[in-house]
Amino acid sequence: MRIWKSEQVSRRTFVSKILYSTLGGGLAIASAFQFPLHSDAEVFFDTDRYGDREITISTINRLKQTLRNTLSKNLNLLPQYIQLALHDALSYSVQTKKGGLNGSLRLELQRPGNAFLSSCYQTIEDAHRSYSDVGYADYIAFAGAVVMDIIGAPRVKLQVGREDASEPDEENQLSKQDVSYPYALESSFQQAGLEAARNTVLFLGALGFLSQVSEQFANSKETDEEQGLESSDIFDNPELTYGDVSQKGKRTVAVGTQVRKLKLPGIKFNNQFLKKLIAQKNNNKNKSTNLQSSTQDKYLVLLEEPRFLEYVQYYAKNDQKFKSDFVDAYRDITLLGSKYETLKK
């Protein structure tokens, strides 16, 4: 039976109060429940938050359908949905063990490096208002997963049941953004204890691809509207097919989603953006090859810095590796600073 919603107290806090306020029954409760009452981790997962296995699947289905409906109206959100997770998750510091993908981004949008995500984040607020059983942090994590579903990326498994933060996390280079975006991203990966140069190339390669997809369909939408077509026609049959759910320890449910029909027609996630960067490097006479000037300026550093260029060249030659490593990298950032709350029997 569910005992709390996103706005309510978590079971961790609830049981913590019982243990500290109960004298006679305290030991009995402590032996029956084992929750992390004190921890440096900042992202708490209650894996029973949405109920049993069937209810969890139903919740995730509804969550992802809500996000899909939003994306069907505005494909410009494709790269920004990935960035929501990046900016929330990379608040984590491996030294302090604080931060992570805990929904604190909603309290940090006034920061210079996060401000451009304000409009995008508003769609998460709108989704949350329509279906408030799901917490902000889970919405943000699964927004990126929905993007991957739509563009035909490999399946990503995400943990559900995040507890939303009640206060902002510490600032980092990504939220300050007093250096260019690639360097801010690299610095934040370093702070989080992740392989910085490789992850920077993976995420910027994916963001570049998504930016081009959104531009492509923005242009096609103008054509479709001239022909009297609905914007939703760009999607295939919206029927959803979700699964699978695997058991990871006691009461820890990892929900993987596979949406075979929730995709943009003719779009398959790949390393083409990195290939175009390499082509640009090899053809200085045509520096605007298939790249918008703003995008070009944003990612030129990947060609100029040897530590980045090494991975650009590697992934430009290895499409399958690029796709699988990006999915793994996305999953990894969603788990930064994680601590689980489960019932032990």
Image (cartoon, grey):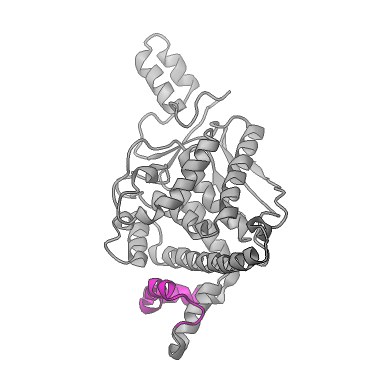
Whether residue 138 appears in this view of the structure is: no
Residue sticking out furthest to the left: 178
- Identify the image quadrant of residue 184: bottom left
As drawn, 112 above or below 182: above
- Whether residue 76 sits left or right of residue 320 in the image: it is left
As drawn, 96 above or below 340: below
Would you say the magenta stretch is mainly helix, strand or loop?
helix
Does 123 lie within the magenta span? no
Q: Position of residue 187 (x, y in %)?
A: 32, 61
Residue sticking out furthest to the top: 24
Whether residue 197 appears in this view of the structure is: yes
Q: Position of residue 118 (x, y in %)?
A: 40, 51
Report the residue at 44% width, 20% height from top.
30
Tell me the quarter of the image containing the C terminus.
top right
Report the residue at 46% width, 15% height from top.
28
Report the residue at 68% width, 61% height from top.
229
Q: Position of residue 168 (x, y in %)?
A: 32, 42
Does 301 lie within the magenta span? yes
Tell me the quarter of the image containing the N terminus.
top right
As drawn, 2 above or below 235: above
- Whether residue 43 sits left or right of residue 148 in the image: it is left
Report the residue at 32% width, 67% height from top.
180
Q: Position of residue 190 (x, y in %)?
A: 34, 59
Depth check: give the residue in front, 340 or 299.
299
Magenta-tinted stretch: 288-314
- Across the whole image, how many numbered discs are drawn on residues? 0
Depth check: give the residue in front, 292 or 306.
292
- Whether residue 322 sits left or right of residue 235 in the image: it is left
Depth check: give the residue in front, 51 or 290.
290
